[in-house]
Structures are given as C-alpha cells and as structure tokens.
Amino acid sequence: FPEMAGAEGEDSLYPIAVLIDELRNEDVQLRLNSIKKLSTIALALGVERTRTELIPFLTDTIYDEDEVLLALAEQLGNFTMLVGGPEYVHCLLPPLESLATVEETVVRDKAVESLRKISQEHSPVDLEVHFEPLVKRLASGDWFTSRTSACGLFSVCYPRVSNTVKAEIRQHFRTLCSDETPMVRRAAASKLGEFAKVLELDYVKSDIIPLFTALASDEQDSVRLLAVEACVSIATLLPQEDLETLVMSTLRQAAEDKSWRVRYMVADKFSELQKAVGPEITKNDLVPAFQNLLKDCEAEVRAAAANKVKEFCENLPEDSRETLIMSHVLPCVKELVSDTNQHVKSALASVIMGLSTILGKDNTVEHLLPLFLVQLKDECPEVRLNIISNLDCVNEVIGIRQLSQSLLPAIVELAEDAKWRVRLAIIEYMPLLAGQLGVEFFDEKLNSLCMAWLVDHVYAIREAATCNLMKLVEKFGAEWAQNTIVPKVLGMSNDPNYLHRMTTLFCIKALSEACGQEITTKHMLPVVLKMSNDQVANVRFNVAKCLQKIGPVIDSNALQAEVKPVLEKLATDQDMDVKYFAQEAISVLALA
C-alpha cells in the first residue's frame, strides 16, 4: 500500500497504516490482532480498494501461523458487504481457496465453512463461472488437503447449477469416493448423506447407492463408520420398496462389522436408523441386529446399544410392540443387568425405568422390578443413582404401594448397610427420593431412617444426615419440620451420649434458616441456651458456635435478653476453647 506511508499525517488513515504494518509484523500476536480488525481496515479502505488492494495482499501473504490463518478464514466468511455485496463476492474466493489447501485441518475446515457461507451469496451465473471451477480445482488438486476440502463444497453448489455442471460435480464426487488417500475417502464418506439430500432421486439410486456400498466396505474402518452415518440420510430419501434391495444388506453387514468402532456407530445411530427404515424392516431386520449389539463382545458397543433400549422399544410398531420387547429385547436386558462392565450397567440403568411406561403395570411388577432390585444393590454408585433418580416413572405405572413393598426394603437395607460409604450414598439420594415419593409416604416409611442416621457412630454419616434434614425441610416446608423433625431433634439434647447432644446443635445450626424466625426463637433457642450448662466442654463451645450461626435468624429482643447473657457467661468459662468461641460469637453478633 504505497500511499499509506505518506498518509500518516491524516488522522483517518493513520490507524489503518498501523494495522497494515501489523499484518507484516514479526510478532504473531500483533498479526493476529490485526486480522481480527480486518473489517475495520476494509471499511476504512472502501469497497473498491478492499477488492483491488486488500484482498490480493491477503491472498499473497498466506504463509503464516495457523492461528492467524484460522482468524483470516473466519473473517473472510463475513466479508461480502465489505467488497461491495453479492455481485463482487467472487473476489473472496482466491484467498479462501489457498486457505482450503493448507496442512492444518482446523484452518481448512474454517475456510470450507466460510466458502459454504459465501456460496449462498453467489448468483447462479457466478456459481458456474467462479465457484464451481474452484471446487473442480480443489477436487483435482495434487495434495490430499485440497481434495478433502472439495468434499464439503459439492452439496452447496449442486442445486443451483445447470445440468451439464451437475453431471461434472457428480463425477468429481464419485472420483473422490475412491481416492487412494484414506483421508479423502473419509471426507467424502462424511459428506455422502448431505450430498445425497440435494441430488435428484434417480441419481441417489444410480450414483449414491453404489458409492455408499463401496464406502461401507472400505478397507479402513474410519471410512466404514462414516458410511453408517450417511445411511440414515440415504434411507430417509428412498421410497420404502427400494430400501430392502438398495440399503439393507449393507446395513446388516455394518451391524456385524469386524471393527467394534463400526458396530458402535450402528448402535449409536440405532434410533435414527429405525425411524428411517420404518416398522416392517425394523421388525424383520433391526430387532435381531439390536439383540446382537446388546450381546456384543465389546463393552463400548453394549453400552451404546443399552443407551438406546428405551427409544428403540418406544418406536417399535404398536401392534407388536409388547411381544417384540418381551420375547426379544427383555432377555438381553436381563443379561446386561449383571454385565461385567460398569459403563454398560450404568447406561442401562439410566433408561431401563422408562420401559415400565411402555410395558404397563403387570409386566413391570413381574419382569422389571426384579431387575431394578438387582441394580439398586449394584456396587457401582452410578448404577444405583440412575435407578433412584428415575423412580418417579415407575411410581406412575405401578403406584406407590407396590413400589414401597418391592423397592423400599432394598433402600432400607442399603441405609443400614455395614459399610458406612454405602449408607452415605443412600443419604445423598434421600432428598431426591423424598421429592419423588411425596411427604406422606416419606413420613410413613423413611423419616425414621433419617433420624437414625443422626445417631450413627460414624461422624461423616451424622454430618450428612444433618445436611439431609436441611434439604428435606427446604422441600417440605417449615410447618412439616415443626411437626415431624424439630421435636425429635430437640429430644436428643437430653441424650446421655454427648456426641448425640452435639448432633442436636449441628441440626439446629443447619435447620434455623429453613425453619425461620418463629420456630427458631420459640422452639430451638431455649434448648440451645439450656445446653450452655452442659458438663462437657465440647458441647458448651458448640453452643457458642451454634448461637453465632442462628443469631441472625433470632428476633433481636431475644438476642439481647437471652443470648447475650449466656454468651457472656461462656466467655468466662474455665475451658480455653469455650472462652474463645463465646468471644468470637459476641463480636460477630455485635453484642459487645
């Protein structure tokens, strides 16, 4: 930009000169900043100079760090108006074409994304004159990088060009599908479904199907698994009567592929495939294929299939759904419940409860409940959590009575397990369970458990139980707390074991906020104050800590009249710790 140098005196052009110098700067960060401000430079230069000077300058300087090129590729996708609108948009093609051939994949992908974006702004004539030749050049480039980029551009120009050009595009795509470089075949396979969607049906049958068949039996599993993905799009496009002859044998072969990655892809896309091929083929072909995937020798494949159990069953044809599930799917599910791999069990546990709504009450009680019980007792916490957090859908089907007779004993058993970590896990699920089962049920069956944990001999359990009470009060409200929880908690203040007396204080600390001013002042405070005379120093200093915590909740009269004298007395206690915590409470509550 020769005249830029002399323009430094003119304020308007000066920053532009700086930005342009920065594009050439040694420092990557400065070049990167300058690229990110490219639109500012273009606006200042105006559309004509952007076309005649800036774009050629950028095209010539594409030898840079990847992050600078990435920023450039992104910027150019938004440049249409800055070069004068759609009629000039083709002048952005040269720099993007160079970027689409660089070695770094991320940069190429961004360049292709920008090319796809600006292709929409080309008129049909410009597409044929400027864009399509670029696609051809990329498709027949010497380096695999340019050929992989071409794969992403066929589908955007195909719909809007003449028949002659369409034929050329199809030919180029065919060539790339059998390219000698696996990377190119992979790129072609990944765009096969997208390209099929813009083709006329006859060409889908004559061109795409043979390519699909070839890619699905490619020597590289990374190509084959992408063909599985394309299968969903292709099957959606074809009329029902052609599916069996054109697609199914390839799909059957993929479901039994020697590479687990391909089988995994089939399992992962199973629900989409099922919708694409329709009910008849699902019954005859997909049900046996699904059984095999659930029994696959690779855990990843079993887990992917297990994840799809509920969706697959939901989408089975209604008239034969129950029979198909009971005779074909359920036997495999029963085996997976005791799978050796915890990811498989966990995947299954996250969806298995959903089967109850599909199979109805009797089947759930007879066939599914025994499986839920096994999973509730699984040693893997994720499996247990997945079951407990989905209880509500089973509850809807079989009702709370049935549920409490079957699953509740298992929960109680875990709650009293000899291993304290198992007890801890169940406590953590308690608020969730309470929310799903409702307050009456909770009071009747689970409340006593929650209270029993407060006097557990492991401190971690007592602590978790205290926290659990707070969450329950948040769920069920202060009135519930006053009637069911508070009396039991306060009753523990007379317990001969000082550890249990301390638990009362911990609970009051945790519950005061959720219970509110009235309950705290009227019912809890007197108990705390009485405990300030406890024989055990540990209890006395916990009284001070407790008063400090509940102070803000108590009404101010009680604070002055009742709390202050007790804290002052504790501040003169013989025990060092009691003294310390009492003084701290006085200063925090500003009672001095």
Image (spheres, helix red, strand yellow):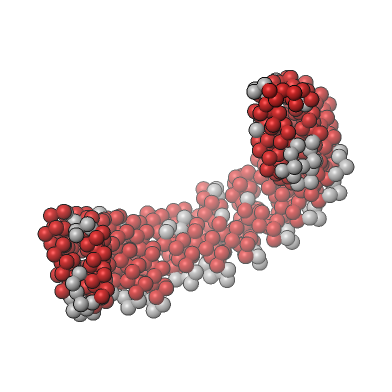
- Is residue 206 positioned above or below 1 on the image? below
In this rendered view, identify the residue nearer to me: 327 or 254.
Answer: 254
The residue at the point 65 percent across, 33 percent down is 37
Q: Is residue 153 visible?
A: no
Left or right of 94 on screen, residue 439: left
Task: Give the x, y percent position of residue 189.
Answer: 75, 46
Left or right of 556 on screen, residue 197: right
In this rendered view, identify the residue nearer to me: 44 or 321.
Answer: 44
Left or right of 491 on screen, residue 10: right
- Is residue 432 positioned above or below 424 on the image? above
**Residue most toward the right?**
142
Which quadrant holds residue 86? top right
Task: Give the x, y percent position of residue 501.
Answer: 23, 74
Task: Give the x, y percent position of residue 25.
Answer: 74, 39
Q: Is residue 8 visible?
A: yes
**Residue most toward the left?**
561
The residue at the point 59 percent across, 61 percent down is 303
The residue at the point 35 percent across, 72 percent down is 461
- Is residue 408 positioned above or below 81 on the image? below
The residue at the point 18 percent across, 72 percent down is 572
In this rendered view, identify the residue nearer to me: 574 or 440.
Answer: 574
In this rendered view, identify the residue nearer to me: 505 or 443.
Answer: 505
Which quadrant holds residue 148? top right
Task: Give the x, y percent position of residue 341.
Answer: 58, 68
Which quadrant holds residue 91? top right
Quadrant, the C terminus? bottom left
**Residue most toward the front?**
9
Quadrant, the N terminus? top right
